[in-house]
Image (spheres, grey):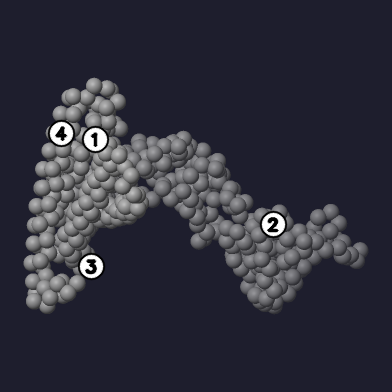
Amino acid sequence: MPITSTYADRGDFPLLKKELAIDKLNDIVDSIKLQKKEVDIKLQLLMKAKTEQEKTRLQAEINEIGNAILEQESSFEMILTAGLELNKADTAEKQDFDWQKDLLEIVQPIISELLQLTENKRKLDGLHKKISFYKSQIGDINEVLKHISKINKQDFEKEALAEFERIDKKWRDQLDENNHLLEVAQLQLDEMVKSQSAKEISIGEHIKQFATGRGATLLMALAAFVAVYFSMLLLLKLLKWIGNRNEEARRTYYQRIITLCYHFLMGALAIAAAFYVLSVRNDQVLIGITVLLLLSIVLLLKNSISGYITELRILLNTGSVREGECIIYNGIPMQVESLNYYTKLINPMLTGLELRLTPAELANYVSRPYLTDEPWFPCRVGDYVMLSDGAYGMVKCITLENILLSLSNGTMPRTYIITDFLAANPKNFSHGFTVTSDFGIDYKYQMQCTTVIPELMCAGIRQGLLKETYGNALKDLAVFCKSQYFVARL
């Protein structure tokens, strides 16, 4: 510790570490030489071995020493290069089409990118595991040597003493080797940490690199997709406006097929534009991710093909719902104004009552033609109605779910669900109504009961109604005789 402090005070601590690294590299080379000599000795013994058991043991020892030599050579290079290495060139030849292999080639850039991002971390973890392993080995060897040192070798015979010394030397060599490997691994770790510390950049630099690299590529690909798609969409709208200015005209079957194919072409060209940008930018990772995303979407949608066929038939106006016909939605007749990806439904009698449904939702309905004089709803906003339960009021609001009734002065509002309202058989007094009253006429006026008296009653009733607050709503009034009764129709 004092030596280290002295060098640090003089500013020569990096120089000391460099000298230690050189010494350690020399030790690695010396160790490799010794291990190669040991391999040569083992090979000679292997050639002289007579039993299979001895040959197997010697071959295992040779393989173990060979692996140790390879590890030492790799350690030598890693110390010099601070853990960096070149990727191996791909020399695989093209073979016949194999979709699994091709899919792996698509995924390979993504995996390679992830491996590259975690390469240094994995190397550091590997070195930490090596250091822990060698420390554990050193602890175990020290325990063995401690136990061996307690053995009294005075009573050993010559051959037993030679075997004892061989085993003792073997464990001490193992201790030296593990100490050496521990120092090598620790030196590798120090060099990698120092190299990575020198290469560390700030979060701002990471963001800047992403913004000028892959982020810019992604943004340009999305911009190309959006530009192509919406440009073709605007062109389609312009062509529709030029070729179909008459709002009442219905699209023909072939026009619908052409429109549908055009929408598919829009999506295909937009995707192709995005892939073109990725290809020009040569970003294989984003290309692979995009391909995997498209494949995932196709796999997710393949189980819904029958549903899409039904929706396509509806869009082509050949399904269960036809354009211009009528469906019953929540008890209310609704006209299919136009079939599209969002179909517009209206009720001609109820202004402002509109609804948009997708083809998937429309597949649950069946439309029918409607008559020109067919009523679309029993009433509209502002009408006075009476229900079968005796409730009477003015219709204030009509929606697809509810209807609101109130008195003429706006008080006592009552809300009905549409189905309950229609089940109550509403009578619409705003379309006209009849009042029947029984009364008697003196016999001397019976000759005038079908001529003069109805006219006098009509004039009197009209005069009385006009005096009321609702008199301005009077449209027509008629009084006529039916059998023995007078009937006033309002």
Residue 440 visible to the viewer:
yes
Read off the residue under disc 4.
41
Q: In x, y percent, where is residue 289?
A: 28, 47
Read off the residue under disc 3.
203
Mark 2 to mark 3 CA distance (whole Å): 65 Å
Mark 4 to mark 3 CA distance (whole Å): 56 Å
Looking at the image, is mark 1 or mark 3 nearer the viewer? Answer: 1
Looking at the image, is mark 4 or mark 3 nearer the viewer? Answer: 4
- Within 10 Å of the Cα at label 3, are there few (<14), some (14-19), or many (20+) other Cα atoms? few
Q: Quadrant of the N terminus?
A: bottom left
Q: Nearer the viewer, residue 137 or 125?
A: 137
Q: Amino acid at mark 4?
A: Ile
Read off the residue under disc 1.
61
Q: Nearer the viewer, residue 460 or 133?
A: 133
Q: In x, y percent, where is residue 173?
A: 22, 47
Q: Nearer the viewer, residue 380 or 77?
A: 77
Read off the residue under disc 2.
420
Looking at the image, is mark 2 or mark 4 nearer the viewer? Answer: 4
Which residue appears at 23% of the width and 67% of the height?
203
Looking at the image, is mark 2 or mark 3 nearer the viewer? Answer: 3
Q: In x, y percent, where is residue 413?
A: 67, 71
Quadrant assignment, res 21: bottom left
Which residue appears at 48% of the width and 50% of the height?
357
Cβ atoms at labels 4 and 3 below 8 Å apart: no
Q: Earlier in the sequence, mark 4 or mark 1?
A: 4
Mark 1 to mark 3 CA distance (whole Å): 50 Å
Q: Amino acid at mark 2?
A: Asp
Cβ atoms at labels 2 and 1 below 8 Å apart: no
- Within 10 Å of the Cα at label 4, are there few (<14), some (14-19), or many (20+) other Cα atoms? few
**Which disc is residue 259 wearing?**
none
